[in-house]
């Protein structure tokens, strides 16, 4: 990339659609006018960016855990790149949240110095990896849902959020397609791979109801033209997932009613364990720089 700051990189046309655009800068929002648009509730915007940023950060960490454990070298590189994409998105979204809330907290403060109850990610992102089929199906469900949200966020009334979404769409489209190809390969493969893929789908499916539950913050910002009501993307996600599962010869579980959990800070013990690993160094040496 030839950009001198992240905002140029977000805004410019580029053939490199999978650049992890948030990872190459000390300040992800350098060069951006961070002003919250008139009429937008800054606290709600901060909370919303935390939701989207936490989803990306936690999912990124889960994918990074596959390094040295993936079934083949090419797939290990692919998962690491997807994790890096999500880390870049998390940096920008958490930085945007920090500016919007105006409490002097930056991306590192929000990533490393919040407890599990303060995180707002969905449960699907924090679930432990399980076997390769489990992580593959989880990525399919997560990326399909996230892509539908981001596609609509490109029209957000917050220009910073719109720019982040526009760049993220290109990355997450790859994430979804990559997971879909592997889901079909596993589901329509050997008896064992089919069995594991179906078990993964059955185990993960109860977590999908949360993806389409509308939090009050999402409702408020959707009405303001800033955010997206996740209930509005359910039909699109159902259609995409249905097509992939049909090609993978996997049985689709019964629909799960919408329910809120992670958006309100209710998490499984898996998130606390993940944060111990992710935050340990920063908390042990809070003033360190390298």
Image: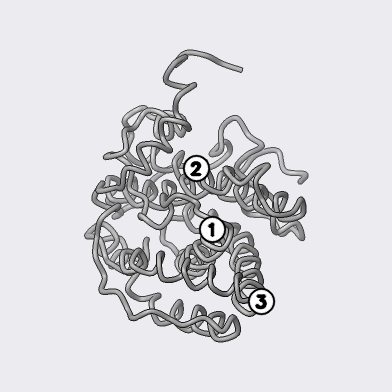
CA gap between label 3 and label 1 equals 17 Å
Marking on residue 33 = 2
Residue at image x 32%, y 66%? 222
Marking on residue 135 = 1
Q: Are marks 3 and 1 in contact (CB under 8 Å)?
A: no
Q: Is residue 135 left or right of residue 261?
A: right
Tell which circle, 1 or 2, labels the residue nearer the N-terminal end: 2
Q: Which residue is mark 3?
A: 189
Q: Is residue 152 visible?
A: no
Residue at image x 37%, y 67%? 208
Tell which circle, 3 or 2, labels the residue nearer the N-terminal end: 2
Residue 78 vertical placement versus 232 (above, below): above
Residue 125 vertical placement versus 190 (above, below): above
Residue at image x 61%, y 17%? 290
Q: Secondary structure at mark 2?
A: loop
Tell which circle, 3 or 1, labels the residue nearer the N-terminal end: 1
Q: Could you say where residue 87 lies in the image, as x and y percent from the top left?
A: 56, 44
């Amino acid at each position: 990339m030839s950009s001198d700051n992240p905002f140029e990189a977000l805004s410019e046309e580029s053939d490199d659609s999978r650049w992890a655009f948030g990872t190459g800068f000390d300040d992800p929002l350098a060069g951006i006018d961070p002003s919250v648009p008139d009429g937008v509730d800054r606290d709600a915007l901060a909370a919303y960016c935390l939701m989207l940023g936490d989803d990306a950060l936690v999912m990124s960490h889960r994918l990074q855990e596959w390094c040295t454990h993936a079934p083949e070298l090419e797939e290990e590189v692919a998962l690491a790149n997807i994790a890096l994409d999500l880390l870049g998105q998390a940096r920008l979204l958490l930085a945007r949240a920090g500016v919007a809330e105006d409490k002097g907290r930056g991306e590192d403060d929000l990533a490393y110095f919040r407890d599990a109850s303060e995180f707002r990610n969905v449960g699907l992102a924090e679930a432990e990896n399980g076997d390769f089929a489990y992580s593959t199906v989880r990525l399919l469900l997560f990326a399909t849902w996230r892509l539908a949200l981001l596609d609509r966020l490109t029209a957000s009334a917050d220009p910073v959020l719109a720019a982040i979404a526009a760049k993220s769409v290109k990355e997450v489209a790859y994430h979804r397609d990559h997971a879909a190809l592997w889901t079909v390969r596993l589901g329509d493969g050997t008896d064992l791979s089919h069995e594991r893929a179906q078990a993964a789908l059955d185990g993960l499916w109860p977590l999908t109801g949360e993806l389409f539950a509308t939090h009050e913050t999402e409702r408020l910002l959707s009405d303001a033209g800033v955010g997206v009501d996740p209930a509005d993307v359910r039909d699109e996600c159902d259609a995409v997932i249905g097509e992939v599962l049909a090609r993978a010869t996997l049985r689709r579980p019964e629909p799960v009613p919408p329910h809120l959990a992670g958006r309100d800070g209710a998490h499984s013990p898996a998130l606390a364990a993940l944060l111990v690993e992710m935050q340990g160094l920063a908390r042990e040496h809070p003033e360190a720089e390298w």
